[in-house]
Image: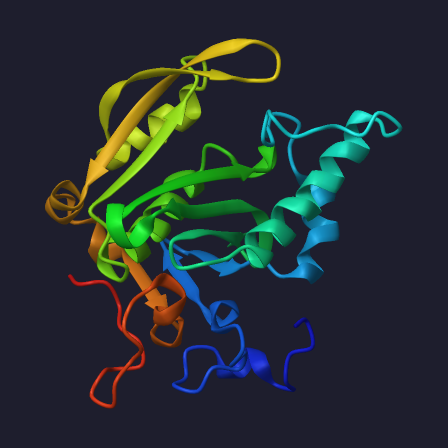
């Protein structure tokens, strides 16, 4: 799956995908100068090396006792990717994007859903290297995946959650327009912790005007991957978010 046809990068956004068996690799999102592209296996060594210490993997993930913490975190970076690709279905999926700023990979933004054809609700997660924080990149990358979710996947809502001390994540969500949606408890692996839940509706997204800031290319061949009808002869190959 990693052997792309020659010149594949030049085909991004064209009607015929350069990855016919996995057109998700041709998907591109853009917002405020930030570019998001799906993570590929070749990205994993870099992502494992640059993931910040404050990025928490699944707290329920089992650690291998023969490995130190950094080795376990690197292993989980690989396994998270392989799991998201290997278990993909229209009803349960996780799409990981490499976030590029000024031509360099600076982090990861994910968009995920469970029972999506029925619930039409997405969640998200992300991390950025410390050197590029506080530049608005976190907001731009979240807006990009929300544009994909609401304007192309026809999601009804987006949800997220963060611990009360995660001011950065909560700040990004509230600046975009998420509303508080209660609290819940979760087992962090180090004990029970409280999470603040937030929710953004499709109506609130449309009212915000953020859709005009997001561009999406390479989406139409991906429609069946999300349980949507395949593109027909009269459907445009790509479209940007409605302005």
Residue 181 placed where, x, y %?
A: 23, 23
In this rendered view, identify the residue nearer to me: 159 or 43: 159
Q: Is residue 72 above or below residue 103?
A: above
Q: Residue furthest right?
A: 66
Report the label total: 0
Measuring 17% from the left and 63% from the top, which residue is drawn there?
A: 242
Q: Is residue 146 above or below residue 28?
A: above
Toward which corner of the image does residue 29 lie, by quadrant?
Answer: bottom left
76 lies left or right of 175: right
Residue 34 placed where, x, y %?
A: 44, 54
224 lies left or right of 199: right
Location of the N terminus (image quadrant): bottom right
Toward which corner of the image does residue 104 lie, by quadrant?
Answer: bottom right
In this picture the colour scheme is: rainbow
Measuring 47% from the left and 46% from the top, which residue is drawn there?
A: 110
Residue 78 placed where, x, y %?
A: 70, 48
Residue 243 placed where, x, y %?
A: 15, 61
Q: Residue furthest bottom?
A: 233
In this rendered view, identify the residue nearer to me: 148 or 75: 75
Measuring 62% from the left and 45% from the top, which residue is drawn there?
A: 80
In this rendered view, identify the residue nearer to me: 122 or 108: 122
In this rendered view, identify the residue nearer to me: 139 or 114: 114
Toward which corner of the image does residue 238 lie, by quadrant?
Answer: bottom left
């Amino acid at each position: 799956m990693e052997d792309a046809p020659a010149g594949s990068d030049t085909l991004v956004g064209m009607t015929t995908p350069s990855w016919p068996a996995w057109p998700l690799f041709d998907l591109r999102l853009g917002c405020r100068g930030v570019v998001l592209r799906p993570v590929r296996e070749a990205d994993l060594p870099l992502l494992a090396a640059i993931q910040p210490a404050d990025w928490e993997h699944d707290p329920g993930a089992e650690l291998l006792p023969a490995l130190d913490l950094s080795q376990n975190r690197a292993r989980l970076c690989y396994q998270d990717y392989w799991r998201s690709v290997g278990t993909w279905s229209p009803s349960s999926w996780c799409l990981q994007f490499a976030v590029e700023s000024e031509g360099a990979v600076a982090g990861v933004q994910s968009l995920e859903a469970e029972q999506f054809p029925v619930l039409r609700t997405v969640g998200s997660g992300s991390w950025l290297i410390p050197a590029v924080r506080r530049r608005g990149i976190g907001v731009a990358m979240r807006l990009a995946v929300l544009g994909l979710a609401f304007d192309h996947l026809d999601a009804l809502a987006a949800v997220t959650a963060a611990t009360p001390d995660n001011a950065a994540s909560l700040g990004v969500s509230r600046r975009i327009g998420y509303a508080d949606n209660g609290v819940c408890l979760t087992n962090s692996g180090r004990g029970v912790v409280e999470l603040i839940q937030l929710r953004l509706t499709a109506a609130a997204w449309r009212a915000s005007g953020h859709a005009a800031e997001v561009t999406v290319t390479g989406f139409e061949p991906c429609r069946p991957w999300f349980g949507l009808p395949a593109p027909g002869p009269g459907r445009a190959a790509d479209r940007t978010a409605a302005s």
